[in-house]
């Protein structure tokens, strides 16, 4: 649906060349919620703007539904842009127009008849849950409400693609969750392909099915969210994952436990099926070993459970060893080395 | 020789009418051409929707050389052109021509500055929605900047009242001419006071109208 073929974008800033996007090749499939994550300055914002040609690639090709964007006339490009909705970190609503006026704007550009505009605007405001705010002006709304207006406006022309430029970065966590739910509905109920950029890993794990990690203009990791999350290859990706998933307690805390008598501390990670079975209790009962969960989390990514537990086993040394051996066949388990110095 | 107020009040009313006439027409022409020049200046600026180094450079240069010229010098300097265009250099209509030109460039700069205060993100959003440059001008730039624009025009109209008094000095009519002829050259303080009071009232009214309209447009 959206294809980047070896795309680069170079800016000239004060006679210096800045490579915002370097040799990026990736494909966003129809129906995806595709997330691009990177720290600020990674080039993700530029990448996003290549999709509707707000930025023109220096080299390479961007294709949408097999159409090379570079081949379009100015008029055809404007037509295409109407099929790509866009929302922004700072919402970019028209302060001189009401909520309904903002949503109606792209329809007015198309010359849609007035009655049809009114019908469609009401329908969209209903969809985003802001029917009662139709006559308000943007400045009277909260951040979350503004973004809802932004989404309604972006959906007005029935786009096939919605691109989101840090759409939740200016919002508090609760509002972020609401907006992400709304984006998920946009994808599920309206079948719109979503391409979003963010610097927040939890946005990716909450709604995306595929992810690209960007650094210095390059895509350094690309794949299904669950794969990238469970087996990150690049150190930057690992840093992003740690930001939502601190998998071990601090060294100080581990040492405290160790000194207090927890000598067998193990980290267990498991995905999917293993979480459905009472594996731990079955095995530990069998060997008469007790365990205590000292740290951990279980999270859902793309409908899969992903568990990470830190356990302290108590009991006879040999029996603990045997229990661990048996567990190793079922789940990923490794001893947590406590720094005793 | 002091004026006889039982008959002179008519001259004052007439002069007030001339001043209002000069300022109103100058404002209309100044606003129309000023908005056109200001918009052109803004859209042709670097990285803007119709970037054009030449048009921007030329307009910017003309504004920069005309605006600092003292109005009385400009008025005299422009007389040959005024005679060609208006057929005369004396009278109210003749004064409107140089005033409108000066107003055009003042308004242009104010328009440009107001437009620059629009969040570029809003312009980007309309581009992303498939708006053409012309659509952006009429559906985004003008509506988004309208409130401050009205305040800017109010500011200009008040300086036009000032200009009209200067124009009066070289035969443009209006309250300025009355004040100079009777108040200054014939030492009639009463005329001076009356004209000054009327000018103050006119300025207050202009400011009030501008504020009211701007308030309506900005809804704050």
Image (cartoon, coloured by chain):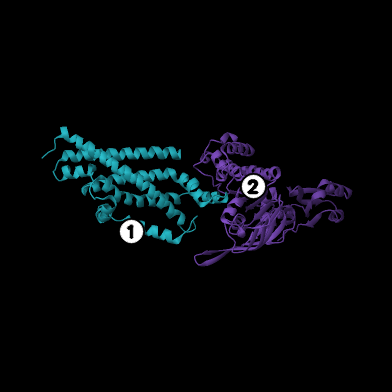
Chain colours: A purple, B cyan
Whether B30 is drawn above or below B204: the answer is: below
x and y percentages locating residue B29 in the rendered image: 35, 47
Name the chain letter of the residue that bears numbered label 2. A
Q: Compared to A265, does A172 lie above or below?
A: above
Q: How dense is the environment of label 2, judged by Cα within 10 Å: few (below 14), some, or many (20 and up)?
A: some
The answer to which quarter of the image holds residue A254 is bottom right
The C terminus of chain A - image quarter: bottom right
Task: Pinpoint residue A143: horizontal percent, then vertical percent.
Answer: 56, 43
The one nearer the camera, B189 or A271, is: B189
**Viewer-proximal residue, A202 or B193?**
B193
Chain identifier of the residue bearing label 1 in the image:
B
Q: Secondary structure at mark 2?
A: loop
Numbered tag placed on residue A159 in the rendering: 2
Tell me if B43 is positioned left or right of A111 in this view: left
Position of B14 with respect to A224 (left or right) is left
Above or below, A251 relative to B165: below
Q: In this rendering, does residue A165 appear at all?
A: no
**Local secondary structure at mark 1:** helix
**Residue A178 visible, this angle:** yes
Label 1 to label 2, Cα distance in Å?
Answer: 49 Å
Q: Residue at 34% across / 45% down in the picture?
A: B27
Whether callout 1 and callout 2 share a subunit is answered: no
Q: Which residue sits furthest top?
A: B6
Q: Residue furthest left?
A: B1
Residue lying at 55% horizontally and 45% vertically, measured from the top left: A109
Q: Residue at x 44, y 39 (%)?
A: B217
- Give the number of callouts: 2
For the N terminus of chain A, the quadrant is bottom right
Across and down, in percent, residue A333 comes to 80, 55
Which quarter of the figure has residue A101?
top right
Q: Residues within 10 Å of mark 1 (few under 14, many from 20)?
A: few
Q: Which residue is mark 1?
A: B65
């Amino acid at each position: 649906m959206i294809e980047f073929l070896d795309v680069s974008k170079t800016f000239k800033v004060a006679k210096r060349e800045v490579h915002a996007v370097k040799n990026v090749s990736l494909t966003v499939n129809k129906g995806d919620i595709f997330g691009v994550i990177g720290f600020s300055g990674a080039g993700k914002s530029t990448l996003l703007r290549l999709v509707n040609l707000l930025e023109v690639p220096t080299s390479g090709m961007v294709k949408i539904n097999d159409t090379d964007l570079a081949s379009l006339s100015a008029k055809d490009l404007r037509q295409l842009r109407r099929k790509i909705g866009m929302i922004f970190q700072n919402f970019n609503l028209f302060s001189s127009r009401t909520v309904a006026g903002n949503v109606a704007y792209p329809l007015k550009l198309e010359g849609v008849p007035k009655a049809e505009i009114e019908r469609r605007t009401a329908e969209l405001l209903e969809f985003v849950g802001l029917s009662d705010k139709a006559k308000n002006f943007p400045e009277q709304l909260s951040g979350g409400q503004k973004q809802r207006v932004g989404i309604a406006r972006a959906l007005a022309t029935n786009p096939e693609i919605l691109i989101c430029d840090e759409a939740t970065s200016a919002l508090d966590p609760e509002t972020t969750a609401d907006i992400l739910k709304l984006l998920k509905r946009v994808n599920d109920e309206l079948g719109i392909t979503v391409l979003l950029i963010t610097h927040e890993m939890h946005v990716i794990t909450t709604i995306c099915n595929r992810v690209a990690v960007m650094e210095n203009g390059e895509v350094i990791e690309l794949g299904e969210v669950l794969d990238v999350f469970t087996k990150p290859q690049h150190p930057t990706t690992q840093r992003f994952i740690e930001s939502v998933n601190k998998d071990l307690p601090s060294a100080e805390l581990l040492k405290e436990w160790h000194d207090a008598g927890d000598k067998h501390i193990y980290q267990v990670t498991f995905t999917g099926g293993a979480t459905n079975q009472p594996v731990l209790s079955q095995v530990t009962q069998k060997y008469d070993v007790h365990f205590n969960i000292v740290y951990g989390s279980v999270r859902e990514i793309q409908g899969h459970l992903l568990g990470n537990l830190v356990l302290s086993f108590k009991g006879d040394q040999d029996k603990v060893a045997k229990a661990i051996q048996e567990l190793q066949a079922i789940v990923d388990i490794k001893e947590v080395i406590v720094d005793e110095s | 020789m002091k004026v006889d107020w039982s008959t002179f009040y008519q001259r004052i009313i007439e002069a007030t009418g001339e001043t209002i006439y000069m300022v109103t027409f100058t404002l209309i022409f100044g606003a129309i051409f000023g908005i056109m020049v200001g918009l052109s200046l803004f859209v042709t600026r670097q990285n803007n929707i119709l970037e054009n180094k030449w048009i921007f450079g030329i307009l910017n240069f003309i504004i920069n050389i005309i605006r600092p010229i003292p109005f009385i010098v400009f008025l005299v300097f422009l007389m040959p052109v005024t005679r060609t265009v208006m057929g005369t250099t004396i009278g109210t209509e003749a004064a409107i021509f140089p005033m409108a030109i000066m107003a055009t460039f003042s308004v242009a700069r104010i328009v440009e500055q107001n437009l620059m205060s629009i969040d570029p993100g809003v312009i980007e959003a309309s581009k992303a929605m498939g708006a053409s440059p012309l659509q952006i001008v009429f559906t985004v730039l003008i509506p988004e900047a309208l409130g401050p624009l009205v305040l800017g025009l109010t500011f200009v109209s008040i300086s036009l009242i000032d200009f009209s008094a200067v124009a009066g000095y070289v035969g443009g009519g209006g309250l300025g001419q009355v004040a100079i002829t009777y108040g200054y050259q014939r030492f009639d303080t009463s005329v001076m006071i009356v004209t000054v009071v009327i000018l103050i009232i006119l300025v207050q009214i202009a400011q009030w109208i501008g504020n009211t309209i701007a308030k309506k447009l900005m809804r704050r």
